[in-house]
Image (tube, rainbow, N blue to C red):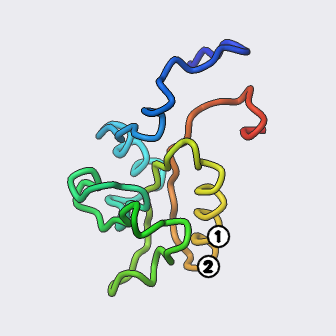
Amino acid sequence: MSHVTAGKKSETPVNKKDFWNTSDLAINDALALCGISDFDLDACATTSKESRGFEFIAPEECALSTDWKSKFNYTIKSVWCNPPFSQKELFLKRAKEQSAKHNLTVCCMIPFEPCTKWWR
């Protein structure tokens, strides 16, 4: 169980907050939760190595404006999204939109912050 202290600020430097890599354990948990064997697309990877072999939308391609399914010539059915935390709300809205538009399974990794306004 996670312990959250009300009013306690993150100690992560501001210039590092958007650059958290996804652990293999987190990916495996997400796959199990989604009931799938792999993701087809990583909407927020910065390199092919970081995307773990999934197709990916690089930062310069802007996943907030690029159509997540139409960019690729084959069928994208599942998307992993570990967004820059400074843009998490924008990416959650985009994930919901792209999921509805293309009937995609989208799994987003966001910080557990139930005492913040955006979470509520």
| The disc label shown at residue 113, or none | none
In the image, residue 105 sits, relative to residue 47, either above or below, namely: below
Q: What residue is rendered at 32% in x and 58% in y? A: 37
Q: CA distance from mark 1 to mark 2?
A: 6 Å
**Mark 2 lies on residue:** 101
Which quadrant would residue 21 be assigned to in this image? top left
Q: Give percent across and percent down for residue 48.
A: 23, 59
Front residue of this view, candidates 83 and 35: 83
Q: Are marks 1 and 2 in contact (CB under 8 Å)?
A: yes
Counting the numbered discs, the total is 2
Question: Which residue sits furthest bottom?
Answer: 73
Q: Give percent across and percent down for residue 65.
A: 55, 72
Which quadrant would residue 53 be assigned to in this image? bottom left
| The disc label shown at residue 97, or none | 1
Q: Give percent across and percent down for residue 116.
A: 74, 30
Q: What residue is rendered at 39% in x and 37% in y? A: 20
Q: Amino acid at mark 2?
A: Lys
In the image, residue 23 sits, relative to residue 82, either above or below, namely: above
Q: Is residue 42 left or right of residue 94?
A: left
Front residue of this view, candidates 59 and 105: 59
Q: Quadrant of the N terminus?
A: top right
Q: Residues within 10 Å of mark 2 (few under 14, many from 20)?
A: few
Question: Which residue sits furthest front?
Answer: 15
Q: Give percent across and percent down for residue 31.
A: 39, 51
